[in-house]
Amino acid sequence: MIKPLTSLRFFFALLVFFMHVSFCFPAAINASWYLQIENHFFKEGFVGVGFFFTLSGFILSYSYEKKILNSDISYKDFLVARIARIYPLHIVTMLLAAPLMLSDFLHNKILWLVKLVCNLLLVQSFISYEHVYSSFNMVSWSLSDEMFFYALFPILIFFVSRNAKNKYVLISLLILVPVIVFLLGDHRPWYNFYINPFLRVTDFILGILLYKLSKQAKAISFAKASILEIAAIGLLITFFSINAYIPEVYRYSCFYWLPIAVIIFIFSMSKGWLSNILSSKYLVLLGEISFAFYLLHDLVLRGVKIASKRFYQFDSVVLIIISLVLTIALSYFFHKRVELPMNIYIKKRWANRKKVQVS
């Protein structure tokens, strides 16, 4: 069940990477075919974050539902496990981003200190001021959202598992999102519907509901699963192809829920041809380093752009290739040397190791 979903994380992380490429190196390739891909796919890279949030709800349900319901893990140990998962690389990338914050420090030391504290506590996404939630390593606002989701998860999984009818309460929360989007319209769409943890938690809830649904799924043949997997990818491509006709406020919030849900549900069965490919050793490894890739990619892109301006002006395409290779190499290094060992150390130091596993 998990291997294909793990590999898919990297491909969605690549979408986020190329979204930031379009910001750092606009019009890197002037060919019309590339511009079409950039407009319909790369600039929609924010869908990757929605995929991560939904997949997080699904994977946590898969990994922890029984342990929480059977009281095999305490609330404290669950949170320690999640902190161990995201904090080490968050701190490292925040320190790597610190030189980029030097001008902010010189300009307003009090505001810089506020940004620092918010990032250390991972509460920056609760502050609607852009200079706070996008400070230091700007993509870490999503970790702030994730920590909020983690704090809620044991409550949500207990609630939805306690009574089958309770799932309709969570479904109603999902239905509320397009209503809220319609009522608020285009008022600060980037923060209100993309950053805001109180609305983005619905992506996470969608993942929990998908897991509950997947437990009821019947076994299917290899041929049928293969067709469904191709159709699921085709559905996402279809949504990308029509995004120009959809207001961005919906694209930031709920427009991509359907293809994301279908992809996670179908590939969680791990029965088809594409699942076999995605379960290969090296693609799974790329999926495992995808968290580090996500946290490092924007810093690498900004660093390569600055270095190019100061030392040698390479062609944008060359800079993009250098950035991608460098991000993958650094992601592997930090995954092996920081993420995994610190994950084990923190759990060994703060949690009951008999009840908490590396995940």
Image: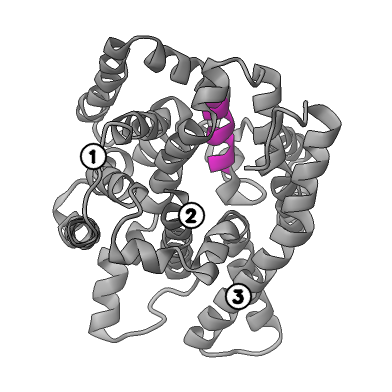
Residue, disc 1 = 218
Counting every numbered tag in the picture gives 3
Q: CA distance from mark 2 to mark 1?
A: 22 Å
Q: Position of residue 289 (x, y in %)?
A: 60, 60
Residue type marked 3: Lys
Amino acid under disc 1: Lys
Q: Which mark is residue 159?
A: none
| Circle on res. 305 | 3
Foreground: 288 or 277?
277
Picture coordinates of residue 152, whole percent (x, y): 52, 21
The stretch of residues the image draws in magenta is 141-150
Closer to the eye: label 1 or 3: 1
Up-down relation of residue 85 to residue 282 (above or below): above
Is residue 95 visible in the rendered image? The answer is no
Residue positioned 31% across, 36% down in the render: 214
Residue at the (56%, 16%) spot, across then down:
70
Specify whether residue 198 is in view.
Answer: yes
Question: Amino acid type of disc 2?
Answer: Thr
